[in-house]
Image: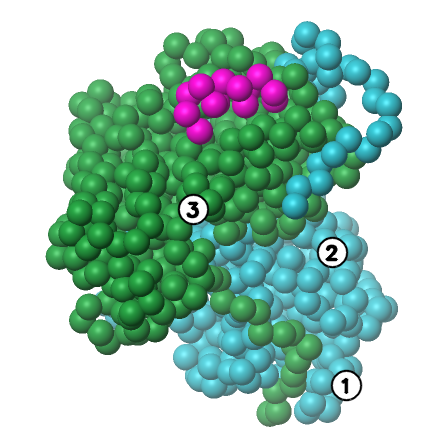
Amino acid sequence: MVAVCQWKQIPLAPPDSIFHLTVAYKADPSLQKINVGVGAYRDEDNKPWVLPVVKKATGILLNDPTLDHEYLSVTGLPEFGSAAAKLILGSNSHALAESRVVSVQTISGTGANHLGALFLSRFYQWNGPPVVGLSNPTWSNHDAIFKNVGITPVDYPYYNPATIGLDYNGFLAALRNAVPRSVFLLHACAHNPTGVDPTKKQWTAIADVMLEKGHYAFFDCAYQGFASGDLDQDAFAVRYFVERKVPLLICQSFSKNAGLYGERIGALHVVSSTAEEGARVDSQLSVLQRSEIGNPPSHGARLVSLILNDPDLFEEWNRDIKTMAQRIIAMRQELYHLLTKELKTPGSWEHIINQIGMFSFTGINPSQCQVLLAKAHIYLPTNGRISMAGLNSKNIRYFAESLDKAVRGTL
Amino acid sequence: MYSLRSSGRSLAPCWRLPSRSLSIWNHVPAGPPDPILGITEAFKADKDPRKINLGVGAYRDENGKPYVLPSVKAAEDRIYNAKADKEYLPITGLGELNKLAAKLAYGAESAPLLEGRIASTQSISGTGALRIGGAFLARHYPGVKTIYLPVPSWGNHTPLFRDSGLEVKGYRYLDKKTIGLDFAGLKEDLAAAPEKSIVLLHACAHNPTGVDPTPEQWAEISDIVKVSIQVSVSNARLFPFFDFAYQGFASGDTTRDAFALRYFVSQGHNIALAQSFAKNMGLYGERVGLFSVTTSSPEEKARVDSQIKILVRPLYSNPPLHGARIASTILADSLLSAQWEKEVKGMADRIISMRNELYNHLTHDLKTPGEWGHIKSQIGMFSFTGLTTPQAKALGEKAHIYMTSEGRISMAGLNSHNIKYFADSVDAAVRGTL
């Protein structure tokens, strides 16, 4: 039987840039190789780390005779959604007290971004063609997520390569110059890929302009707890904007802060003006979710719900988060020390300790990245972003020395 | 560079009003409630002890309880003890699962499987598989982007395919008079569908009717879908997309339930397939499924795989881990797999015995007016009873028995404790004496 070329016109698509790096890393036989590509936490031995509290919660679920694998409702496990909302908004949030928050369980942060974007594409009253302001740079998947639902991404200035810091004036100017009621995607904390966050004072000014212009804030929050080690501190920007009544939604991920990457657990929270309006928004989000996934996956939701709703487990989770955040901060300090004190690498390296969260924009250029890849077996994307979690006491010296040589051009 | 500049048009300054920033969603209408899920809500709110939920298609045991398959429990224990990590799966999911799920559906001897020509992705259960399939066809199918659904079909098919960008039409399926297959109508409509349209086929245990074509009828359908009885199907008239949510659940035999799709593949058709493990492994909420499409060569498979990844990444990046590991653990282990097949048969057998009992009650005990043979001849979890919408409504309101307004019941909701009450109530509804 001759099989026929049904799909002969389909071109080969380029591989996903980030996952592709990991594939290449795995195939590399070098013993010195380092993967600072994917943003997944690694422990001191460069191993994935299942949080002790997650292990505990898993055991509890497994031994609970009342649990089954039944469908969740379309918008997910209610105890998860409400606890997740409380986590990001704070338990004394007025929006929560007034039942103005619509929470939908999603397939992690990507799913929340997609559902939020889809909802906006259907229901936002656009002032002109549908457009979203994305920081330059931003997470590599944001562009495709919005384009996929018919919203055109447009850059706003964010990162200043000259200072390896925030282009604050450029950012504010973009907000001011945009047509009223524009939509802007904001990273709640631990900006991906730069690690550069606005200060509290800067967030205040950003909120001022957004209110003046009637803009909509599309918050992406994938690192709550991971930035400073403190869940409440990392929620500052979101909570401040909610209190100031900036219209907004929040995409929330538990991939990193609970180490639940593959279980795909996240939430979309849409803050409405009244509970009644929220009910209508909820019903429409339901319709959208039903026709795409039916209902969201159960296991991750049960784990997180257990952890968030049990005071002891919640405390333990806080400790596990601090373990991760502190190891990353220690790596930042160690790298900074090696570059500035020992190797005296040309350039300024303050940004390594000033930047926040899992990622650091090293400031090296694409050809220096290529050289690290080709000569030193160090895997990072060409924008110079490194995942600090890929570093540990065993490999940090080799990394620092390689980076030093790449900067000097002697690799 | 950014270009969010004001266009210079004068805008009504409604955004300056103090409350403007809060009433962003004022204009959003309430969405329509999901009819099937609404039934469960009504059931939950009902306090009558005799209440029966025959709405959602989830298996229930003899005591009306959800059933966690022992093989699933065993797999979960194994996974826990293996202390596996929680790392991201690849975009197209757990490779092991994809291989084993394809083998389960297509058969170990299937040519496209053996030749490495099946492009696939783990999906968010059957719904996700259908949706990825719909999106893939909307973007890449070189033919007519219209999908023909049987009338009736699962309620979610229409919004799902429409939202993925296909036009949705119907072909005759249920003969309301006989509550059986309108085979003549089906053949006519498929023969009349424009060349290169897409046709959705329920692989077995048609939802909602339970009415399946016979093997002989499947052979005829296959011929209509081809252009001729020639060996080459380069000009296949229609593109078959199989929805396979009940493998094992229909007859109790996973091989037998795969007959239709395997027959089509053996006849040389290129197909797309949406597989679900929600029912046959009882993994409902864990969302385990597979979308696959047969291609002509490993090279073509690679191209198709790459495009499927492009579809998945901006939707949810990669699929969930837990359910995939459970399904993969079971399918990879011959003992566990054999145990699972027995458990599926157990579920199917209990449903078949409920069908027989209900038929006997109505026909022999109660002598309920009408012909009830369809209860026995229908296959799988659902039965189209033939009850009218007013009768279904009355059953809900007066007898606290919940089914869809089209009279579809989930047989799994019946058991030896409630079947007599159900039969009595149906009898009364038909006689108008409820």
Image point 27% across, 33% down: which residue?
A: A66
> In 3D space, how far apart are the residues under numbered discs 3 and 1 (Cα atoms)?
56 Å
Image point 44% across, 19% down: which residue?
A: A201
Does B180 lie within the magenta span? Answer: no
The disc labelled 1 sits on which kind of residue?
Ser
In the image shown, does A193 or A261 lie closer to the viewer? A193
Q: Look at the picture and state if A174 lies above or below A23.
A: above
What chain is tagged by disc 3? A
Which of the 4 image quarters holds residue A330? top left
Q: Is residue B78 left or right of residue B303?
A: left
Figure colour scheme: by chain
Of marks 1 and 2, which one's residue comes earlier in the chain? Answer: 2
Q: What is the display colour for chain B?
A: cyan
Q: Are the residues flagged by discs 3 and 1 in contact, CB closer than 8 Å?
A: no
Q: Are the residues flagged by discs 1 and 2 in contact, CB closer than 8 Å?
A: no
Which stretch did the figure color magenta?
A198-210
Q: Is residue A33 left or right of residue B109?
A: left
Which residue is disc 3 drawn over? A193
> In 3D space, how far apart are the residues under numbered discs 1 and 2 (Cα atoms)?
26 Å
Does A203 lie within the magenta span? Answer: yes
> In 3D space, how far apart are the residues under numbered discs 2 and 3 (Cα atoms)?
36 Å
Per the rendering, the mark at residue B228 is 1
